[in-house]
Amino acid sequence: MRDFPTRYGNWAVVAGASEGLGAAFATELAKRRMHLLLIARRGDALQAVADRLRQDHRIEVRVLVLDLASPALAGSLSDATAELEVGVIVYNAAYVPVASFLELEDDALDQLLHVNVQGPVRFLRALLPSMRERRRGAVVLMSSLAGMQGSPRIAAYAASKAFNTVLGESLWHELCEHGVEVVVSCAGAITTPRYLKSTDRIPPGTMTADAVARETLDALGKGPRVVPGALNRFFAVLFDRVLPRRTAIRLMAENTKDLK
Ligand SMILES: NC(=O)c1ccc[n+]([C@@H]2O[C@H](COP(=O)([O-])OP(=O)(O)OC[C@H]3O[C@@H](n4cnc5c(N)ncnc54)[C@H](OP(=O)(O)O)[C@@H]3O)[C@@H](O)[C@H]2O)c1
């Protein structure tokens, strides 16, 4: 198989790269010889990831300190990538407030819609045109098993992940004929710092961020959707195709009832 720079272009952009899965995507892309543009709000954390990757992999790494909820996203991205041949783009950031829907503060809901829905839309519309023009590139959208059925106490988050799944699958088909590969990654639980703060229980199927990043990037060009991890693939089929919908939602509620 051709390497990533040859297959897609020299640069990768990772949105939400200062820790957790985004930092793991950056590391996995660096191992695949991609130069990196890393985006997040915390400049210090982002710079630490960038310094480590420059040192370990001898690649070029740029950082863009930016709130992905900001309407300035599209303009900032265009400026930051104007001279780069962007080959791989990963929208990893998400906001995950935990509460029943009516208890969620208006501000939290707005932030969720900005980061999880408007963010990926602006990100894709800023970066996809040049990839389509060059007739090569790859897109990763992070979704979740939570987006496959109703997920009480994370209802709006789950719905935002369903949005990303359907958007990504649609783009997989639209962009296929233009040489751009798209994959949606429907992950189960991942041991990221944020997730570990939200729970006292590690459910079956939980994976490391490194394993999820690797399986997701390996899935490019193989189909519209990947569920990392064999046990999670079993759960996905069980919840999506075998169980009655109401049972799947009740089981999900059991899973999310103790989230903090
Ligand atoms: N962890 C899990 O169990 C799990 C399971 C299934 C799917 N996922 C999906 O995997 C992805 C990563 O999860 P995670 O647990 O690693 O998430 P996370 O730690 O909460 O956030 C990941 C990154 O996004 C950045 N970010 C968040 N809001 C931002 C904003 N407004 N502007 C710019 N950057 C922002 C954070 O950096 P800053 O704070 O520095 O901005 C961080 O680098 C998400 O899409 C999530 O839905 C996670």
Image (cartoon, helix red, strand yellow):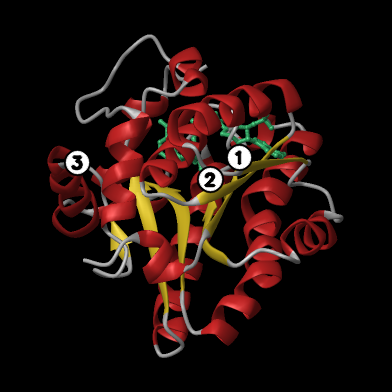
Does any portion of residue 220 appear in the rendered image? yes
Residue position marked by numbered label 3 in the rendering: 229
Image position of 157 (left or right of 149) = right
Marks 3 and 2, how far apart at CA: 18 Å
**Which amino acid type corresponds to the residue marked 3 in the rendered image?**
Gly
Residue position marked by numbered label 1 in the rendering: 16
Against 10, residue 198 (above or below) is above
Q: Mark 3: which secondary structure? A: loop
**Which amino acid type corresponds to the residue marked 1 in the rendered image?**
Gly
Marks 2 and 1, how far apart at CA: 5 Å
Quadrant assignment for ligand 1: top right
Disc 3 residue crowd, few under 14, some 14–19, many 20+, Cα 10 Å: some
Q: Nearer the viewer, mark 1 or mark 3?
A: 1
Decide if ligand 1 comes within 8 Å of the CB at mark 2.
yes
Marks 1 and 3, how far apart at CA: 22 Å
Comparing 36 with 115, the one in front is 36
**Which amino acid type corresponds to the residue marked 2 in the rendered image?**
Asn
Comparing 242 with 102, the one in front is 242
Quarter of the image holding residue 258? top left
Comparing 93 with 210, the one in front is 210
Q: Mark 2: which secondary structure? A: loop
Q: x%, y% of residue 118?
A: 70, 58
Residue position marked by numbered label 2 in the rendering: 92
Decide if ligand 1 comes within 8 Å of the CB at mark 1.
yes
Residue positioned 74% across, 41% down in the render = 111
Q: x%, y% of residue 199?
A: 42, 15
Image position of 47 (left or right of 206) = right
